[in-house]
Amino acid sequence: MQIVKSIWSFFQNQILGMKWLDALFGRALEALGLDTAKRLGGSIRFFLYDTVKIFVLLSLLIFIISYIQSHFPPERTKKILGRYHGIGANTLAALLGTVTPFCSCSSIPLFIGFSSAGLPVGVTFSFLISSPLVDLGSLVLLMSIFGGRVAFAYVAVGLVLAVIGGTLIEKAGMEKYVEDFVKSAGDVDIEQQEMTRRDRFAYAAQRVKETVKKVAPYIFIGVGIGAVIHNVIPEKWIIAVLGSGNPFSVFLATAVGIPMYADIFGTIPVAESLFAKGAGLGTILAFMMAVTALSLPSMVMLRKAVKPKLLAVFVGIVALGIIVIGYLFNALQFLFV
């Protein structure tokens, strides 16, 4: 058992966490005369290490996920979902959401396509909640920072939220609040040529290029904010505002996260720094979920496809679920750290 723990620790710290890279940057900066124990040197070290680590992991993960995704084009996904009904369809839609694009805005066109194809509104919303919130990339990156238990728990509660959220929307009879142009668009089946292995590799490589280019600004901003939090803002301030002792910390984190726009890779550096400073685990996860699932730009896009009442119900259900998850993780934080 000790051997297994040692192997897992090495994998988490040196492969996923790339701690060797942090040490390498530390030695390089000290050789240049920068004291990494002070604010400036520490901030530069954090920025360089986290930026390189995230881009390396991001590129590798996007390639793997995109290769998997090449087996599930929209038409095939739609046909798979169409075979199931009830909570089984919601569960499958949530699971399929884990192999789709990383941000909520990228998922909405697929959501519109599924809705126009006649899939139940609850199923399409389960997909819409899961797609930006939970993916294989978030699992691996969360493992590199918080460990396996937190990462798997995050993915599990994200999937549960997607299934419950979609089911509640379905039971509430929200179908009539989808905009008419979406419902009347019709089901257009496009025959897609079967991809060869070379085609799939080319597709995955192109997705890496496109996604890295798209998310790079948010990663730089996220890592920059993380560096400031990590090395400049006093720990007692973070604990006072976002620590588990503040009963309103989860509400505050959710409210701050909703207007923002980023993906999971842009929020993780901020989450890493907040956690190191003593912020509650549930508060951090609530912030990450709010940013990725309920960003203001994606809600503006979604409003074009659904009427205000359905949009309000969607935001309310997801926000409430995020808050409940946040308080649950804060209460059970001792199980994860």
Image: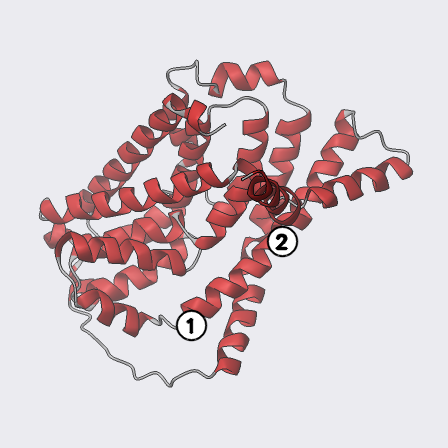
Say which residue appears at 17% left-offset and 63% top-offset: 119
Q: Which residue is mark 1?
A: 70
**Which residue is nearer to you in this view: 92 or 168?**
92
**Which residue is nearer to you in this view: 167 or 68?**
68
Compare marks 1 and 2 and give the one earlier in the sequence.
2
* Residue 91 placement (x, y as % from top left): 24, 53
User: What amino acid type is highlighted by mark number 2?
Assistant: Phe
Q: Can residue 305 be seen?
A: no
Which disc is residue 247 wearing? none
Q: Can residue 313 be seen?
A: yes
Q: Spatial distance from mark 1 to mark 2, Cα to Cα?
A: 22 Å
* Residue 78 placement (x, y as % from top left): 25, 69
Q: Mark 1: few, some, or many residues within 10 Å (few <14, many ≥20)?
A: some
Say which residue appears at 48% left-offset and 18% top-offset: 243
Q: Is residue 269 above or below residue 282?
A: below
> Mark 2 falls on what kind of element?
helix
> Mark 1 falls on what kind of element?
loop
| Left or right of 310 in this view: 156 | right
Which disc is residue 55 wearing? 2
Q: Mark 2: few, some, or many residues within 10 Å (few <14, many ≥20)?
A: some
User: What amino acid type is highlighted by mark number 1?
Assistant: Ser
| Left or right of 306 in this view: 36 | right
